[in-house]
Every structure is written in structure tokens, then in C-alpha cells.
Amino acid sequence: MTNPVFEAVRTLLAVREYQDRAIAEDTVRRIVEAGRLTASSKNGQPWHFVVVRQRQNLREIGALARTGPYIATAGMAIAVAIEKTSAFGVSDASRAIQSMMLTAWAEGVGSNWVGFVHFGGLEAIAKKLGLPDDYDLLAVIPFGYPKRAIGKGQKNRKPLRDVASSEHFGTPFE
């Protein structure tokens, strides 16, 4: 029996080119719900998601994102903000981002992670989105249908024996 969650993890690839096609409202809702439903430390849910779908706003955010100008062509983007006072904000929101990306991928919608709070460069986007001072912008995730077919599952990864041990570091995991 195929495990659809494992299949999404196995085949997920970064997508930076998108079709000029809107994402269905029910798909958008499932993606955002996947983030909301993700577990968090002490159930703190130290995140806030800003869903951006208006083309002009996507263009402006794409122009502000040093590492993600392709946001401008996405069907939507989700800006993921974290509470500055949360010790677990980065970890918890990263989990939520992965949940949203996997949910999208399972529905044929690609994405990629843009920016990172600790490397800076997101302040102008945070200001544009009206984030309050007690939040940091962790990342912006553009979503859209891939412009071209991409090789699902064709990943360049280290062998399992190089990244996993059994019982003790260095004992081969077979």
C-alpha cells in the first residue's frame, strides 16, 4: 500500500517557475489549514500566516525579496510571521511551512522557501504586509502550478547509511 504522506515527502522539489493560473479556493484553504493544524511546542501556535493573492502585491513582494523574485509570478504566497517572544517560533513555524508545502505538493501545487528571519532582508516585506512590531517575518512561501514538468522524486541526496545510525552514532543503519 502506498503512503501518500511519504510519497509527497519523497517527491517534493523546489519550484521557482509557475503557470499563470489561479489556485482553487479549496486548495488554498487546505494549504493554510495544514499550517494552522500543525503541532507546536506547548500548543503555543506562535505564528501568523498572511495569504497574498493579488497580482500587484505578489509583484511588489517579489521585487523586495532578494532571493525570491519569482514570487511575482506565483499564484499566491504565504508570508509566515512568528511571535518575537516565542522561544520555539522558528521551529514551530518551520514545521507549519513544511506541512503547507507538502499539502500543496500533494495537490499538484509547487512551492519554495524564500528568505529567513535571521539572515535579514525581509523587513521591507514585513512592513508592506503590516506586521505588528511583536512579530518577525520568518519566510515567504510562493505557491503555484509548476510551469514545466519536473522530475518527481529525482533528488540528489546522500545515501541513508551516511545520514542515519542505529542505536549509536556511526553504527550503520541498515
Image (cartoon, rainbow, N blue to C red):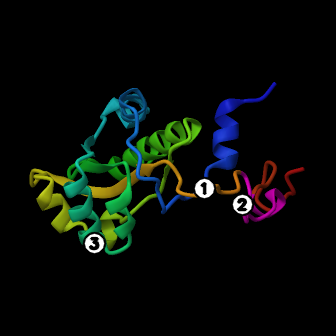
What is the number of callouts on the image? 3
Q: Residue at x 31, y 35 (%)?
A: 45
**Separation of marks 2 and 3 at Cα, in angstroms:** 29 Å
Q: Earlier in the sequence, mark 2 or mark 3?
A: 3
Q: Which residues are magenta?
A: 153-163
In this rendering, position of residue 51 left or right of residue 127: right
Residue at numbered disc 3: 120
Secondary structure of the residue carrying numbered label 1? loop
Q: Of helix, strand and loop, which one carries label 2?
A: loop
Q: Amino acid at mark 1?
A: Leu
Give residue 15's position: percent from left, percent from top.
Answer: 52, 58
- The answer to whether 102 appears left or right of 22 in the picture is right
Q: Quadrant of the N terminus?
A: top right
**Amino acid of disc 3:** Gly
Q: Toward which corner of the image does residue 57 lie, by quadrant? A: bottom left
| Residue, disc 1 | 13
Q: Give the residue type at disc 2.
A: Lys
CB within 8 Å, label 1 to label 3: no
Residue 161 is covered by the magenta coloring:
yes
